[in-house]
Image (cartoon, helix red, strand yellow):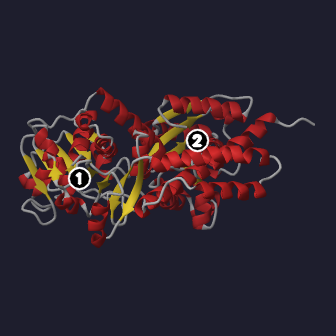
Amino acid sequence: MAYDINELRKEIDAVDLDLLDCIERRMAISRKIGVSKRELGKDILDSSREKSKISALLANAGFESKEYVEEIYKTIFEVSRAHQNKPCFGLLGRTLGHSYSPQIHSLLTNEYSYTIIEREPEELDALFASRVYGGFNVTIPYKKEAFARCDVCDEAASETGSVNTVVFGKDGKTYGYNTDYYGFMFMLRSAGIDPSGKKVLVLGTGGAACAVTYGLRTMNAGDIKSCDLETEINYSNVYDICKDSEIIVNCTPVGMYPKVDNCVIDLDRFPALEAVCDVIYNPSRTKLIQEAQKRGLKTCGGLAMLVAQAYKSSRFFAGDIEGAGRIDSKAEEAIGRVVGILESRMKNITIIGMPGCGKSLLARMLAQRTGRELVDLDQAYAEKIGETPADTIMTQGEDQFRLNETEVAKEYLVKSGLIISSGGGIVTQERNDFWLRCNSNIIYLDRPLEMLASKNRPLSAAKGVEVLYEQRKDRYEALGDIRISLDRFESKDDFFEAALDIMRQGGLDV
């Protein structure tokens, strides 16, 4: 009996995803070893280690792979050495946890490697003196500490008293730059927001706010006012003093993951408002941004700022001092490309549509193709509540089910990078709109009504799919970022490939 080639290819695809994950982890560890060797003054090449490693691998190899192991691992060692030999930069902070910076810099350039540098305050002097790294980006709480340790600072750093990019020069001097303002300027320009002559209200007075204010002055903003909890202009008098603000920029952490359901200010009390900017990038659409969009205002979120400031830093790291200051077509193309990739990777892919339309199937196949974690909200509901949605509807009614559904859904919708299959009626509750939009690319899967399955779906059985569709179709269309309208297919694979084509046309990296 012949093997099913298509099934075997699916197995190969799954193995390849596992291999990619292993290669990624191996290269990350290899980079760390390279940094450690630099710190210890050791050579990158260790021939005896490589020989003994190949011998050990050959002794453990299976019969299918044994004759190829040595050739494969010689290539791996060669690539690892090249990775270790690259100039190394990184992100300096105290407790960094997850950061997108290594991913961003690897997408921007292959001229150097990039790592996380966690240090306590008492370790900073030794770090700056060692010059193990070619330089680093700096995040809170060390931006002012970095400024104090630099021999030469650019105008932006000097004006703000804050350095977020350190470069160790070949002349022995330590150079400090602030690229946050450049990122902010790019964010505004990419969203078509021009602050020239406008009255601008900046929320917050920390390091980000200082860079934003400098950027606004550079872009010839008009009257710039700052608001914070205990400043002269605060949240009790801002609505009187700054009610004529035309642009608001949020530089506070209010609305940032995981406490996303917060809005720092009431936009209705600014009648002249034209645009709202939020330097937060997780979630991608904060409560503040969504409230502004409801009012038809121009908006921009913080991901473009994050990538653009990294782009300028990358030019300093690569020694391209002249190229670091320009926002030209080359910069716009590079930054835009990385923003697009990150948006696609960071956002969940959340599938909405009628009960029985194939949401679970599409989600499952997407998860298999991409390697992303799969969340079926109906299954998550059963795990959290202790009974199925159908059971709750039958015993406690639809209203109680909808309340439970929201509590389950928002637990997952605020996360990043998931594949989520939602219940068909999640769109019936407007309170779910924020959670659906905050961090998801929403896919509306639209299938012919005669194809919809109704087994174990009490609402479809009770009300009929035609009635439900009429009640929900406008909501599906309003919430969906991409609409997939597909008829019957001879196979699930054909259906999936057609859906993939539509998602890619919509800009998703799948």
Mark 2 sits on what residue?
Answer: 354
* Residue at left offset 56%, top offset 37%: 445
Is 443 positioned to the left or the right of 127 in the image? right
Q: Can you say whether 211 is above or below 470 in the image?
A: below
Name the image quarter holding the N terminus.
top right
Residue at the extreme bottom: 122
- Residue 164 on image: x %, y %: 25, 53
Tell me where residue 323 sits by quadrant: top left
The count of marks equals 2
Q: Secondary structure at mark 2?
A: loop
Q: Nearer the viewer, mark 2 or mark 1?
A: 1
- Residue 180 on image: x %, y %: 24, 47
Is 6 positioned to the left or the right of 301 in the image? right
Front in this rendered view, residue 247 or 189: 189
- Residue 451 on image: x %, y %: 68, 35
Q: CA distance from mark 2 to mark 1?
A: 65 Å
* Residue at left offset 51%, top offset 44%: 349
* Amino acid type at mark 1: Gly
Q: Residues within 10 Å of mark 1 (few under 14, many from 20)?
A: few
First in sequence: mark 2 or mark 1?
A: 1
* Residue at left offset 28%, top offset 59%: 253
Residue 172, numbered label: 1
The answer to whether residue 43 of the structure is visible from this angle is: yes
* Amino acid type at mark 2: Met
Front in this rendered view, residue 254 or 66: 66
Tell me where residue 487 sits by quadrant: top right
Tell me where residue 276 sits by quadrant: top left
Q: Secondary structure at mark 1?
A: loop
Is 167 positioned to the left or the right of 224 in the image? right
Name the image quarter holding the C terminus.
top right
The answer to whether residue 20 of the structure is visible from this angle is: no
Front in this rendered view, residue 500 or 171: 171
